[in-house]
Image: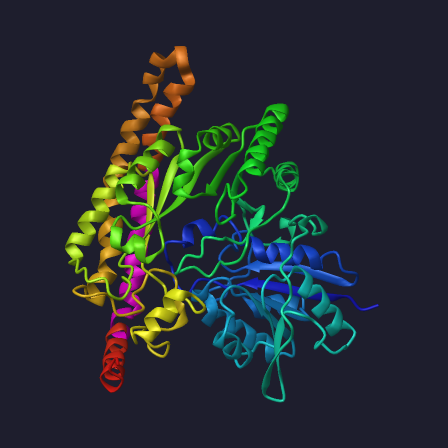
Amino acid sequence: MKRYRLRIVIPAYPAFNVYSRIARGTVALGPVCVASTVNEMERWDVEVIDENNLRRYGPISNSRGADHEFLQRQRPADVVGLYGGLTSTIPRLYKIARFYKERGVITIAGGQHFVGDNITEALSSGIDYVVIGEGEETIKELLSAIENRRDVNNINGIAYLNNGEVVYTPKREPIVDFDKLPLPDFSLVRYAKIKLYPVGRIRGCGMDCEFCTVKGKPRYASPERLLECISFLLETKDARHFFIVDDLFGQQRDETIRFCNMLRDYQKNIGQRLDLTVQIRLDKAKDLELLSAMRQAGIDAVAIGFESPIEEELKAMNKHLSPEDMVSLARIYHKFGFLVHGMFIFGYPLQEGVDVRIPVKRRIKIFKYFIKKAKLDTIQVLLPAPLLGTKLRNRLQKQNRVYSIQDVGWEYYDGNFVLFEPDEPMSAEEMQNAIRNIMGRFYQFRYVFMIGLNIFSFPTLVFFMHNIKLGWKKWYRPWRNALVRFGGWVIMKGWTSEFKKGGFLRKLQKAKERLKTSQNNNPPA
């Protein structure tokens, strides 16, 4: 009997960016989860190709990404799934889809990008079926229908073309019973060297941030399942470094603490220390019991969305903290020994009716002062991206401020490029340069000398023989931060070089001119 092959492709980033380095050592969790469910189907083989991580003998094309000609000759795929979780990779996704479509391969796409008009765009760009929402259950039903040549109209949660018209099947309910799903099988990822393994327990987020596409009531897997996933990866892959991808670690407080205690005991029993990073709300610093349990569980780094140190912007984002409170809470994480990664959005557009004009130099000064005062170990400063399906995009479109996709394509939707007309008096060019200004002050070449100085200071640990753990913390943190900040300088230098070659500023000028014409023709009421 014929066996079938599903190839799931994670498209390459359009160019070198601030995510490129970490992408070379990890993989997106969603495609692995979908592949793991298909792997249980009779007569179906499945593989995941991450075009950003082809470090283990991966067939690389002459331009960017994988050599799909080679892959299709070596292991022909009957169906290709394409991961649209990052809007900036969509042009590459469509290119891959057309390649396979021309060769008679069925193409399926899914991910956060595919909402609203983007679904229609996808179905006219080489995609046969769009999976709307979570894919584990939908993909099995869809592949079974393809295999047996059945009508797909009875499959919930998909969109496809029928005689040129887009057909939407009924919405599929979100998954709530995660125990019925197989554990993510990372052995299905071909060619990748994975150092940082993504794992998760909670899907959804109830914070309803204006700029975010992740919505819906949180749904929880059991702590036992997450621990099983971590222990399985340690035993089979010798995995030591994990990133818990939950949008907000600690949403289910008591169960989160129970998980931390279970993980602490597991590490003690096997005599192995693990390293974990989580995303967490800043105000969780008030929960000292939770922080203590996290540290004992091996959670060393926290990624926190500070978003902005400007009070008016925080209100626009629906954040309920003042900049002063944010500094105090950040320092609590610092005192507990966490490495704090601060994530910011520069130039967030204020709500209508808020008449506050902040010059760009003043904005930059506020950001730099806050970052220093909060004692952050690493930072990431991005620009607001008006993603389709967000309240932010709807608001900016009503104000006729979003640059046309014709001029500023999807490939620029990664948080590193200006995509709309900023608040006055800041210009688009000033806004574009601001993030390099802020991060350029934080990540500098001079830290290479501090790496050496910290290495030479290592013998001073002898003065902490009475408390070697405390001595290690005092030495390790500045050494690690110097190393990361020098590495950040290297990344920023590479991104700046790519930016200059990319011609974005020319496209930005054209987009501004088109928008100005549109505003003149359609003045506000």
Question: Which residue is at the front of the view, 479 or 336?
Answer: 336
Instruction: Give the quarter of the figure containing the C terminus.
Output: bottom left
Image quadrant containing the N terminus:
bottom right
Q: For residue 329, which quarter of the picture?
A: top left
Give the main secondary structure of the magenta stretch: helix
Q: Residue at x 29, y 47 (%)?
A: 489
Q: Position of residue 432 (x, y in %)?
A: 25, 62
In the picture, measured across the screen, residue 309 lies left or right of residue 15, that is left
Chosen colour scheme: rainbow
Where residue 224 sits: x, y (%)? 65, 38
Q: Seen in the image, is 40 located left or right of residue 192?
A: right
Give the vertical position of 100 relative to 290 (above or below): below
Q: Nearer the viewer, residue 395 or 302?
A: 395
Image position of 455 (left or right of 86): left
Q: Measured along the vertical axis of the image, is residue 42 above or below residue 124? A: above
Name of the residue lying farthest toward the bottom: 163
Q: Does residue 195 appear in the picture of this structure?
A: no
Residue 476 position, x and y percent, is 37, 28
Residue at the spot 18% in from the left edge and 48% down from the top edge:
365
Residue at the right extreme of this rendering: 1
Residue 487 painted magenta: yes
- The quadrant holding residue 500 is bottom left
* Range shown magenta: 483-507
- Residue at left offset 32%, top offset 17%: 460
